[in-house]
Amino acid sequence: MGLWWWVCGLLLVGFVVGGDGYPEEDLVVRLPGQPKVGFRQYAGYVDVDVKAGRSLFYYFVEAEKDSDHKPLSLWLNGGPGCSSIGGGAFTEFGPFFPKGDGRGLQINSKSWNKASNLLFVESPAGVGWSYSNTSSDYTCGDASTGHYIPQLAVALLDHNEHSNGYKFNIKGVAIGNPLLRLDRDVPATYEFFWSHGMISDEIGLAIMNECDFDDYTFGSPHNVTAACSDAISKANSIVGDYVNNYDVILDATKISLGVDVCMSYERRFYFNLPQVQKALHANRTNLPHSWSMCSGVLNYSDTDGNINILPLLKRIIESRIPVWVFSGDQDSVVPLLGSRTLVRELAHDLKFKVTVPYGTWFHKGQVGGWATEYGHLLTFATVRGAAHMVPYAQPSRALHLFSSFLRGRRLPNTTHPFIDD
């Protein structure tokens, strides 16, 4: 079994925005080819370790209206090693998308800054324009943001417990198509293939009967038999290059990580324009490589990908912080089948009862997906017709889900929702 790569996005939300905190030297007056807008943007570097010379690049977008009273949402893309600015900000749900010629921008009418202030950080060092002068900083855990965000949230909770000063006001955690636990998420991919008619009964049964995923780890799948390996190889070969694993209903493109091959080229072209980098206060060290969506300079370690994230989510929920796990239902890389089961197991561990039975939620008179809630704090939701990058594939439904999450409201189980997107 080979290593899956994933680029899911997720976010952490806290009401911490205040007008006094804006670094005016980082104000982005206007991006090249940008339409005129009424909100401000900031971009630049945060020096996180001066001694090591490690700095992370960020991009901040104000909410369209009433920004001082809107929450702050932090978005981190996974990969591992993929850009939150290239992904979340300029492909999935930020205020602008690249134009066809790659030299300008167009308005995204379903931008999430309609509901929140947005912060994107390219992390770790070595991703995008983030950098370090210490080579050891380019060793990266092989994780998705299904790991980044829960780990960050727990670190902030630890800080709050031991701090006599500033405390982070975390209002909620949401993670999309996340890798949570290998022994369930890996077999879920092949269950997805089988349930969608992409592999035969014979291959599906061979994987089910011959593969022991209970002790599966990245890098050393020591418990994989020859029969299991053969069945996995056949399944991967059949699906192969003919299906976009991140969006199985989309016709295959030459770039398997992208939903739209043109968007991928336009994005890279735009971010490598000198005038764009100047406007964003980016690439201040003149990096020896061009900007790319996913880093080619990081040395990946397998160990982080093997971590069971459920105990971290349990810690977050026990701190009375709502957690939402959402899944695009056309993603086979980290499919809903694994996430749904693991959320249910987490609810059982928390001794939560079902507070909203599994059922449809609606958006604009149509089924937006399916959702369930446990203990008033843990929600699992699917987004109908969405891919691994949920906001890009289903922008209107994704904004609806995001708005519900921010407001602490359940997704509507009626065709007359109370949220106006």
Image (tube, rainbow, N blue to C red):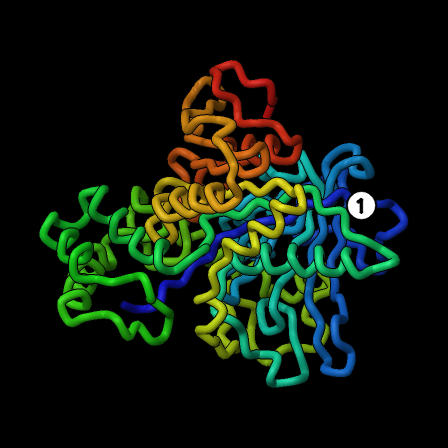
Q: Where is the C terminus found, in terms of image quarters?
A: top right
Question: Which quadrant of the view contains residue 155?
Answer: bottom right
Name the residue: 82% across, 38% down: 68
Q: Which residue is mark 1?
A: 17
Name the image quarter holding residue 152.
bottom right
Under tag 1, what secondary structure?
loop
Most extreme residue toward the left is 202
Q: Residue furthest top?
A: 416
Residue nearest the viewer, comparing 35 with 292? 292
Kindly identify the amino acid type of the residue bearing the numbered disc 1.
Val
Where is residue 402? Give x, y as percent: 58, 36
Residue at (60, 30) in percent of width and height? 404
Viewport quadrant of the N terminus: bottom left
Q: Residues within 10 Å of mark 1 (few under 14, many from 20)?
A: some
Q: Position of residue 395 (x, y in %)?
A: 51, 36
Residue lying at the far right in this picture: please name it: 20
Q: How many marks?
A: 1
